[in-house]
Image (spheres, rainbow, N blue to C red):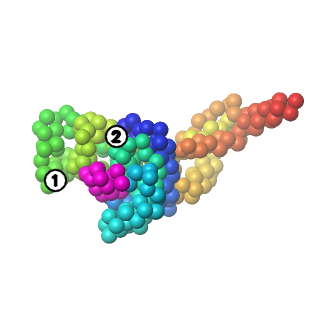
Amino acid sequence: MRAHLGGSSRRSLVTARLTLDAAVKGTDAKAASTLSVELFLIADVLDTNIAVRRALTDSSRDAQSKSVFLAELFASKVSTTALGIASEIVAMRWSTPKDLVLVIEQLAIEAEASAANIAGQLDRLEDEIFTASRAIAGSAELRRALTSNAKLAKATLVSQILKGASDSAVKLVSQLVNTWRGRSIESAFADYAHALAARRNRVIALVRVAVPMSTTQQNRLSVALNKQVGQPVRINIEIEPNVIGGVSIKFADELVDGTVSNRLAGAARAAVGSK
């Protein structure tokens, strides 16, 4: 999240992302997009109801009672997947009640980014969000219209601004202009762009090798990573002769280092430690 989160909330965001990873793994674009809509709905309700938000972040309440409370609020409105994610999230610790809303919103944006990634349109989505932000921020007339008009009028404007854009872009910008959450236009778009970049980082694998990989090797690695993640993964390859041999793969927050240089360094550390 671009906004500052306290220590407990930062740690909870890391865990919450893992929960989202599991939910979108192996799903299709439609299911991921539906999950995004449902998470936005939950975030919107919590954002407009301080009492509910405080009840769900009250550290004196146990996770089970919070889960039951959530089910009473949302079971008829969202899927079991969205409700399950929300239940896991409210069981976490939060520095302030408002952070809960910010993180659920972040996951909602990332779920739509996953939908775009599955459809092979994540690059396009990021470009479209950037283009829309520039168009709106640079027009005094659009700024006034999108911060004061009713939802129907805003929907018409968004469809005009994003004519020919992807469904994901239209959904995200429509959501953004109807839920500023006290942010300026620039800050709101920056938060959305940050969330899209965060999801991109979870579907990019940085591969370090000593010599170029063959097309067959790249395809084989791509298939293996796609299977592990459950959606398309982009491979960025760096050639670094000092790795000597083997391969190092950095994916999201994980590092799998099978290079010869790393094994030699490990052997050296072991030898020094044994003296």
Find the distance from the CA under tag 1 to the CA under tag 2. 21 Å
Regarding residue 236, the answer to whether it shows in the image is: yes
- Marks 2 and 1: in contact by CB < 8 Å? no
Q: What kind of residue is marked 2?
A: Asp
Residue range of the region highlighted in magenta in the rendering: 39-55
- Depth order, front residue of 216/165: 165
Instruction: Give the mark, 1 or 2, whose residue is nearer the N terminus.
Output: 1
- Residue farthest along the right direction in this orientation: 275
Q: Quadrant of the C terminus?
A: top right
Q: Residue at x 50, y 62 (%)?
A: 26
Q: Which residue reaches farthest front? A: 60
- As for residue 268 lying within the magenta part, the answer is no
Q: Is residue 252 left or right of residue 38?
A: right
- Return the mark for residue 151: 1
| Residue pointed to by mark 2 | 191
Observer-nearest of 122 and 34: 34
Report the residue at 65% width, 41% height from top.
248
Q: Is 240 left, or right, of 226 in this rendering?
A: right
Image coordinates of residue 118 in percent, x first then y, are 43, 56
Q: Nearer the viewer, residue 142 or 80?
A: 80
**Foreground residue among 119 and 265:** 265
Place of residue 181 in the rendered image (x, y in percent of width and height, measured from the top left)? 26, 44
Tell me if mark 2 has few (under 14), some (14-19) or many (20+) residues whose alpha carbon lies within 10 angstroms of its own: many
Q: In terms of secondary structure, where does tag 1 sit?
A: helix
Snapshot quadrant of residue 85: bottom left
Q: Please, is residue 34 above or below residue 101 in the view?
A: below
